[in-house]
Image (cartoon, rainbow, N blue to C red):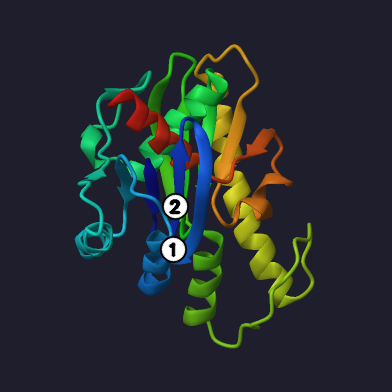
């Protein structure tokens, strides 16, 4: 199977054969020629499973690139229940396919209550119960997006990257520490809410996404980084629908 996780800024892809990950890569969403060259080197996939949150124009580009194979691309939509996970979103299909695939992968990894966090252009913080129910989640601006927003809308802010400090003494550190602590606060507050909901275990986190490294080391809760969580979920969805 060829699996694609298309976000707002990047496309991650991987191939699996007989439960083995054989190829993979990451390209920017505008690097279509690079993606096409990578795909030219691949054997024909048996199936093409795609999570796309980049919109219909992105979906059409993906169809065009994948049309080289006589295999129809399958675009994942969140279901009311799939692969052991129940979806409590008010309109289940409106949940992002990347969030849904990540929830499925996290449930199959842990099998108990946890927070599933993706640190990309936006940061999503989704809660799974001990029964495998997606209870709901947060969407907040990602770390880079928060920094860019401040720099674009506030005069005389410094451009350099700051450091995380408890009590920042310069503007760069103040911005960086502010966005990191805002993200940590949102995650840890959701952890408290999930714990109070009645889980019998310490709430843990699974984090993925390009900015996960900036968060995982500072969380005041058990946390694990998984680089390809959405792709893992797509693999499980593809196997379940085979």
237 lies above or below 3: above
Secondary structure beneath label 2? strand
Residue marked by disc 1: 38
Q: Percent x, y for residue 126?
A: 45, 36
Query: For the residues carrying marks 1 and 2, which lies nearer the camera in this image?
Result: 1
Where, quadrant-wise, is the N terminus in this rendering?
Answer: top left
Q: Is residue 83 left or right of residue 154?
A: left
Where does label 2 land, which residue? 13
Q: How crowded is mark 2: few (under 14 residues within 10 Å), some or many (20 or more)?
A: many
The CA distance from mark 1 to mark 2 is 10 Å
Residue 120, image x, y percentages: 50, 56
Q: How many C-alpha atoms fall within 10 Å of the one at disc 1: few (<14), some, or many (≥20)?
A: some
Question: Which image quadrant for residue 168?
Answer: bottom right
- Residue 37 placement: quadrant: bottom left
In the rendered view, tell whether residue 179 sits above or below residue 99: below
**Residue at (42% x, 29% y) in the render:** 104
Q: Which of marks 1 and 2 is nearer the N terminus?
A: 2
Q: Is residue 87 visible?
A: no
Residue at image point 39% right, 50% down? 43
Residue 182 located left or right of residue 64: right
Q: Give the residue displayed 75% in from the left and 61% down from the top.
A: 164
The extreme bottom residue here reads 156
Residue 89 percent location from the top left of the image: 28, 32
Asked if residue 115 is positioned above or below residue 52 in the image, the reply reads above
* Observer able to see residue 13: yes
Q: Nearer the viewer, residue 68 or 202?
A: 68
Quarter-of-image position of residue 132: top left
Residue 176, label in figure: none
Quadrant in the picture for the C terminus: top left
Determine whether label 1 and label 2 are within 8 Å by CB.
Answer: yes
Front in this rendered view, residue 120 or 5: 5
């Amino acid at each position: 199977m060829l699996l694609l996780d298309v976000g707002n800024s990047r496309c991650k892809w991987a191939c699996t054969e007989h439960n083995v990950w054989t190829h993979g890569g990451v390209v920017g969403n505008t690097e279509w020629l690079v993606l096409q060259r990578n795909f030219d080197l691949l054997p024909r996939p048996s199936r093409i499973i795609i999570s796309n949150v980049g919109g219909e124009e992105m979906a059409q580009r993906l169809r065009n690139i994948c049309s080289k194979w006589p295999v129809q691309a399958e675009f994942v939509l969140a279901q009311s229940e799939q692969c052991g996970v129940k979806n409590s979103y008010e309109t289940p299909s409106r949940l992002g396919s990347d969030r849904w695939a990540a929830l499925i992968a996290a449930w199959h990894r842990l099998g108990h209550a946890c927070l599933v966090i993706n640190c990309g252009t936006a940061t999503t913080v989704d809660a799974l119960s001990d029964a495998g129910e997606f209870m709901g989640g947060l969407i907040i601006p990602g770390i880079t997006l928060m920094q860019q927003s401040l720099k674009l809308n506030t005069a005389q802010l410094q451009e350099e990257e700051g450091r995380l400090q408890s009590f920042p003494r310069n503007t760069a550190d103040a911005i960086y520490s502010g966005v990191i602590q805002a993200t940590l606060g949102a995650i840890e507050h959701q952890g408290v809410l999930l714990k109070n909901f009645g889980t019998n275990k310490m709430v843990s986190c699974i984090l993925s996404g390009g900015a996960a490294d900036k968060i995982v080391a500072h969380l005041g809760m058990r946390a694990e980084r998984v680089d390809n969580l959405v792709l893992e979920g797509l693999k499980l969805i593809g196997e379940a629908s085979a």
